[in-house]
Image (spheres, rainbow, N blue to C red):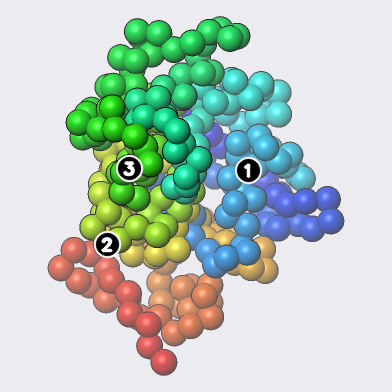
Amino acid sequence: MLATDQLTIGYAARIVANHISLQLSPGEAVAVLGPNGSGKTTLFRTLLGLLPALQGEVRLNSRLLDALTPAEIARDVAYVPQVSAGFFNFSVIEVVEMARVPHLAWYAKPGAFDRKISEQALDELGMSAFVNRMFSSLSGGEQQLVLIARALAAEASTILLDEPTASLDFGNQFLILDAIAKLTGSGRSVLFTTHNPEHALRTAKRTLTMSRDGKVEIGATDIILNSESLASLYGIHIQLFDGPNGRMIAVSK
């Protein structure tokens, strides 16, 4: 379980946001919503132990994060970046097997058991047919699903996804949202950043909003994401209405 208490994030010369208290529950998806420059990436870097907290604390399974080694963090918290070309020389199964490194002895290579775990992760997301394909040959949505499978292969209880639907077409966006639902349905905790309030309304029980002035709010998604809060967050006029598949958003002058 990942939790923060009165967390202040930022850098030596600048506080980005403070008073962040959040506890992720098993089987829960929480969205992080905010404009560019509001601190979403800084928050993730702090939760992963890559940046120290300025004040407050981050705990993982009741232990202070800064008392844990990177390998201990990686065994319980998996990070899924935005799709990039960083795996172009590897097959799909090799990309997924990379997640097994924190579970291996120093200099050990993934073995038959690690291959089995990796294949099961791909199967869970309906990607079994892609095992031997080259990662670079896949579409953006397929690549993102492989990276999520890699997080599953890490056997982490908490998964952080950095804008998982960024640059994806409409159909692939919903493939990823369905994958998030599968993750929470299996009891994992998911924290994901997004620029699309409709994705938060569709997928997340709770939402954490971050504004450029450092204001942070956390609450039930259907309550915290209203026309007034979204207009304040993005500086535009927004209307919410009920559509056939849930609440939808329209931008007005």
Image side of residue 48 versus residue 222, left or right: right
Q: Residue at x 59, y 20 (%)?
A: 72
Q: Nearer the viewer, residue 111 or 57?
A: 111
Q: Nearer the viewer, residue 253 or 226?
A: 253
According to the picture, the residue beneath numbered tag 3 turns out to be 137
Percent x, y of residue 146: 35, 36
Q: Look at discs 3 and 1 and give the one toward the viewer.
A: 3
Quadrant of the image occupied by residue 188: top left
According to the picture, the residue beneath numbered tag 2 turns out to be 170
Among the two numbered marks 2 and 3 on one chain, the one whose residue lies closer to the N terminus: 3
Among the two numbered marks 3 and 1 on one chain, the one whose residue lies closer to the N terminus: 1
Which quarter of the rendered picture does the C terminus lie within? bottom left
Q: What is the distance, in whole Å, between disc 3 and disc 1 at their CAs?
A: 29 Å
Among the two numbered marks 2 and 1 on one chain, the one whose residue lies closer to the N terminus: 1
According to the picture, the residue beneath numbered tag 1 turns out to be 45
Percent x, y of residue 141: 31, 49
Q: Residue at x 64, y 68 (%)?
A: 212
